[in-house]
Image: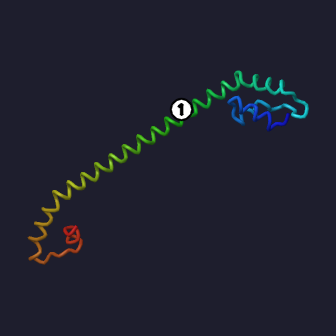
Amino acid sequence: MLKKEAISLAKSHGWTAKDAERAYAGLDFNKVSQEQIVDALVRFAGPELLERQRLQAAQKAQVTRKKNHIKKIEIEFNEKIEEGEKKIAEMRSTFLPLIDKIYNFAKPFGLEDPWIEALLAT
């Protein structure tokens, strides 16, 4: 039996190709029978595969925790940006009328500033 056939046999029973290759490590496919291939799968399916699956589950949990942490940071960051924008809007709504009154009062005395005029125009 060829290695490709052995891997397709394992895949037909729900194995991944990489797990099948790991299980077949050390087999000589020129001298192997189907029983030896199944035996290699059974031997690998014991504690090694269980340990590997446990490690994969732990890794997936770690990735999920990291994604959730990043999402939480993004949400907090967006909230802080919105809060800052609200504060800026409040400050503008408070100070712009005051700046306008002071600027209009000071204009007759010779105060002219293009920056203040642009601020008041926006």
Name the residue located 68 percent from the left edge and 30 percent from the top edge.
14
The answer to which of 61 and 30 lies nearer the viewer is 30
The way the protein has been coloured in the rendering is rainbow
Image check: 65 left or right of 54?
left
- In x, y percent, where is residue 42? 75, 23
Image check: 109 left or right of 4?
left
The answer to which of 33 and 46 lies nearer the viewer is 33
Name the residue located 25 percent from the left edge and 55 percent from the top edge.
88
Name the image quarter holding the C terminus: bottom left
Name the residue located 84 percent from the left edge and 36 percent from the top edge.
2
The answer to which of 108 and 75 lies nearer the viewer is 75
**Most distant residue in the front direction:** 12
Figure label count = 1
Image check: 55 left or right of 113?
right
**Most distant residue in the right direction:** 31
Residue 102 in which image quadrant: bottom left
Q: Is residue 79 above or below residue 6?
A: below
Q: Is residue 92 above or below residue 52?
A: below
Q: Which residue is mark 1?
A: 61
Q: Is residue 32 above or below residue 100?
A: above
Q: Residues within 10 Å of mark 1 (few under 14, many from 20)?
A: few
Three-letter amino acid code at the position of disc 1: Ala
- In x, y percent, where is residue 120? 19, 68
Q: Is residue 76 above or below residue 40?
A: below
Name the image quarter holding the N terminus: top right
Image check: 95 left or right of 47?
left
The answer to which of 111 and 58 lies nearer the viewer is 58
Name the residue located 20 percent from the left edge and 54 percent from the top edge.
90
Question: Which secondary structure lies at badge 1?
Answer: helix
- In x, y percent, where is residue 84? 29, 51
